[in-house]
Image (tube, coloured by chain):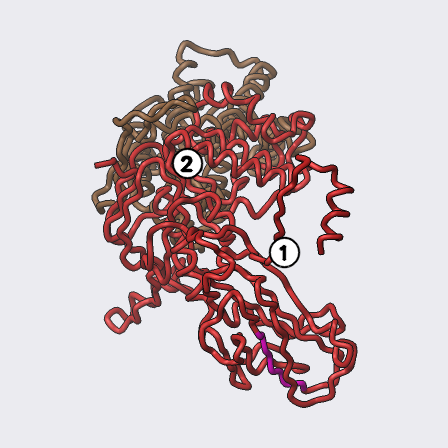
């Protein structure tokens, strides 16, 4: 497809590449080569999302810091103090924040991804590019927020004098797992939103429901351990528990539950990407 | 054989219409319930069967009425949407100017938008940097580079957007109605840029409703109607074919009471373009043309019929109203039927097809009834005033200009004395 750059004024080469345009076969294909060709557009979209997100708000990055901290405070009072939810031996606020940081990346990511195609419909109707770039860039732009909130978590850890152990670097691997899950679920929801407009209204509810099905503000140790593998089918269970284990030495070491979560996460990403690529050709007609 | 830049074979595109565009769970569920009895969703073939070959380096105008499938064809070529049947081969990189500025984000500055929009159009960052100064200069927005584009005037916004797209190095450029915006100077710039693109061996496909631009820019044209190719060939011929189809009924049109253009005050009844002998026979340049309109008045009002005469390229040649008529130009029409006519002088129009819009205006300002392209008339060259020149006579009009030539012994006279000599000679 790329004919390379042709300096203006110089006649074209006869060898200019030929693009064939026809109804695509229904065989699912990721067309990775095309995604790689358009990588610069992905960077531009991420960069645009970040600029616009921070330009428009008064507090800018302040929100990224405040959102998890305020949520942490609320849960600490109601669950930690009043309901006395256990926290695997760490101070409850720290325990909750370590769950909220990856959770909020996920919740914001799927919310924005599912709305992203509609809010960029003018681009989709006028310009060709792999539509996958839109939800993907929205989610990836959230990594900056994630980085900032991890820094906040670091400060709170210092406050509680929680030292890092040798397995702290594994926390990054668990965050990568969260990213994979967010991408997989985000792609599914983004594509479904175009097919069924109801999905837009389902996402906030889904997100709330999912939070309580995930050990964000309570430990998975509340469940009998024979349920843990089944529990791991919710991929965020393994990811968040693992993240907390790597940073705070609480809860679950990598085991069958984390393995199940990782497998489900990969399946979600692959199926989401295939499904999205399969139906993205129709977006311009439907939007 | 020259290589085709674009080859289309049997391209067809079907769209669902109405509510079938997107579904809700409820629709899907209820469809599943009455499977079998389910009604097929309504659909429309925007393109029925289009086969075309466009030579490399050519500039081709794509014309046709609204809904002919022009935009759908551009969307398929730029891969925004897929054809339902058929296939196309496109040689080289395709850039499109489909409503420029869609990629701009109001919160970003001019500079940021140049980079973002360039990336969106498929440019590499290095490519944009290389062209950056030229883009800014072309748009003429140097002073506002660091200002968010939401503060731009709409003209500046369009100029910047077009500038980015125009500097995209593509083999094929698709242009859709971008010239409708911007002032005359900018339009000239845009046309120049498109000309330059085609001189450099790029293929340009240009969609416009302005036949003048198509005629100026394109050597050949394609007429699309109802999703099929109706004509291809030299621009002038295709445009004339298109415009001759536009005037339904041709020289005469009569409306029913229900379908007549107009409102409760006045409706058009009958419009005709007659030749010198007041009939529908051939019309010649050396003879006058009579335009006539009949209109029915239901409520008293001060009304004026108006004609607008356009040539084959869509250029308005002139417009005329009965303001000059002392008897009716200023007076109130009581209810009833009225007939008005005017004559277009002989030796004014050029050869070719002219279309006539008929209007009735209230109080010299408010258009109450309007029939665009109500009638059309073909002006035939009867060879008068041609001597032995047989070629095309250029120009929007072709007046007789009272030529006189005499031999001047003293070389070039100064103007005053020659003017005096002329008046003496007459």
- Locate residue B259, reporting x and y percent: 52, 81
Q: Residue furthest bottom?
A: B336
Is label 2 in contact with label 1 (beta carbons under 8 Å)? no
The C terminus of chain B: image quadrant = bottom right
Judge left or right: residue B391 versus residue A255.
right
Q: Which residues are magenta?
A: B290-297
In this rendering, the count of numbered labels is 2
Q: Chain of mark 1?
A: B
Q: Residues within 10 Å of mark 1 (few under 14, many from 20)?
A: few
Asked whether A93 falls inside the magenta stretch, the response is: no
- Locate residue B171, reporting x and y percent: 37, 32
Chain B drawn colour = red
Please say whether residue A152 is visible from this viewpoint: yes
- Locate residue A287, reporting x and y percent: 44, 51
Callout 1 secondary element: loop
Q: Main secondary structure of the magenta part?
A: strand
Q: Is residue B275 above or below residue A163?
A: below
> In the rendered image, which quarter is residue B89 located in?
top left
> In the rendered image, which quarter is residue A157 located in?
top right
Q: Which residue is mark 1?
A: B402
Q: Is residue B270 above or below residue A4?
A: below
Chain ID, brown in image:
A
Q: Which residue is mark 2?
A: B95
Callout 2 secondary element: strand
Q: Chain of mark 2?
A: B
- A272 or A24: nearer the viewer: A24
- A145 or B325: nearer the viewer: B325
Disc 2 versus disc 1: nearer the observer: 1
Report the Cα–Cα distance between label 2 and label 1.
51 Å
Please say whether residue A191 is visible from this viewpoint: no
């Amino acid at each position: 497809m790329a004919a390379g750059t042709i300096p203006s004024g110089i006649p074209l080469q006869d060898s200019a590449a030929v693009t064939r345009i026809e109804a695509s076969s229904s065989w699912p294909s990721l067309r990775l080569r095309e995604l790689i060709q358009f990588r610069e557009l992905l960077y531009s979209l991420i960069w645009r999302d970040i600029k616009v997100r921070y330009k428009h708000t008064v507090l800018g990055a302040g929100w990224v810091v405040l959102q998890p901290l305020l949520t942490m405070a609320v849960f600490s009072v109601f669950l930690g103090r009043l309901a006395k939810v256990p926290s695997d031996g760490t101070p409850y606020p720290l325990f909750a924040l370590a769950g909220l940081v990856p959770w909020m990346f996920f919740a914001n990511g799927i919310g924005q991804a599912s709305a992203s195609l509609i809010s960029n419909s003018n681009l989709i109707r006028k310009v060709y590019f792999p539509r996958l770039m839109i939800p993907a860039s929205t989610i990836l732009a959230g990594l900056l927020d994630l980085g900032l909130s991890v820094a906040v978590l670091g400060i709170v850890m210092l406050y509680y004098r929680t030292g890092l152990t040798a397995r702290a670097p594994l926390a990054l691997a668990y965050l990568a797992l969260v990213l994979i899950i967010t991408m997989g679920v985000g792609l599914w929801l983004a594509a479904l939103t175009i097919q069924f407009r109801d999905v837009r209204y389902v996402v906030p509810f889904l997100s709330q429901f999912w939070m309580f099905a995930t050990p964000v503000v309570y430990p998975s140790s509340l469940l009998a351990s024979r349920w843990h593998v089944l529990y791991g089918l919710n991929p965020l269970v393994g990811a968040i528990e693992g993240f907390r284990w790597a940073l705070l030495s609480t809860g679950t070491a990598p085991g069958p539950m984390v393995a199940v979560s990782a497998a489900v996460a990969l399946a979600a990403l692959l199926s989401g990407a295939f499904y999205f690529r399969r139906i993205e050709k129709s977006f311009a007609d439907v939007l | 054989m020259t290589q085709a830049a674009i080859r289309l074979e049997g391209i067809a595109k079907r769209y669902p219409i109405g509510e079938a565009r997107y579904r809700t769970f409820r629709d899907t569920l209820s469809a599943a319930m009455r499977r079998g009895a389910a009604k097929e969703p309504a659909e429309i073939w925007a393109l029925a069967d289009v086969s075309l070959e466009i030579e490399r380096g050519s500039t081709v105008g794509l014309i046709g009425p609204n809904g002919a499938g022009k935009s759908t064809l551009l969307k398929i070529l730029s891969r925004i949407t897929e054809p339902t049947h058929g296939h196309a081969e496109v040689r080289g990189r395709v850039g499109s100017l489909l409503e420029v500025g869609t990629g701009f984000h109001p919160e970003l500055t001019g500079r940021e938008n140049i980079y973002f929009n360039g990336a969106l159009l498929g440019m590499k960052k290095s490519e944009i940097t290389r062209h950056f100064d030229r883009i800014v200069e072309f748009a003429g927005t140097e002073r506002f580079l660091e200002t968010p584009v939401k503060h731009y005037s709409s003209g500046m916004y369009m100029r910047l957007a077009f500038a980015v797209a125009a500097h995209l190095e593509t083999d094929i450029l698709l242009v859709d109605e971008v010239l409708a915006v911007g002032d005359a100077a900018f339009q000239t710039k845009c046309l120049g840029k498109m000309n330059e693109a085609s001189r450099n061996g790029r293929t340009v496909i240009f969609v416009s409703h302005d036949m003048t631009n198509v005629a100026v820019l394109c050597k050949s044209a394609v007429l699309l109607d109802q999703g099929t190719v109706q004509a291809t060939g030299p621009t002038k011929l295709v445009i004339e074919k298109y415009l001759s189809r536009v005037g339904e009924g041709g020289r005469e049109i009569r409306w029913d009471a229900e379908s007549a253009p107009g409102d409760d005050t006045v409706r058009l009844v009958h419009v005709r373009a007659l030749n010198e002998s007041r009939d529908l026979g051939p019309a010649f340049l050396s003879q006058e043309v009579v335009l006539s309109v009949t209109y029915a008045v239901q409520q008293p009002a001060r009304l004026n019929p108006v004609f607008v005469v356009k040539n084959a390229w869509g250029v308005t040649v002139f417009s005329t109203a009965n303001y000059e008529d002392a008897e009716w130009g200023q007076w109130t029409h009581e209810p009833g039927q009225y007939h008005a006519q005017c004559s277009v002088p002989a030796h004014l129009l050029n050869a070719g097809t002219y279309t006539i819009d008929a209007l009735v205006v209230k109080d010299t300002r408010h258009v109450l009834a309007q029939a665009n392209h109500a009638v059309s008339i073909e002006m035939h060259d009867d060879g008068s005033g041609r001597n032995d020149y047989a070629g095309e006579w250029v120009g929007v009009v072709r007046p007789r200009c009272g030529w006189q030539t005499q031999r001047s012994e003293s070389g070039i006279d100064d103007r005053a004395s020659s003017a005096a000599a002329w008046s003496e000679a007459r």
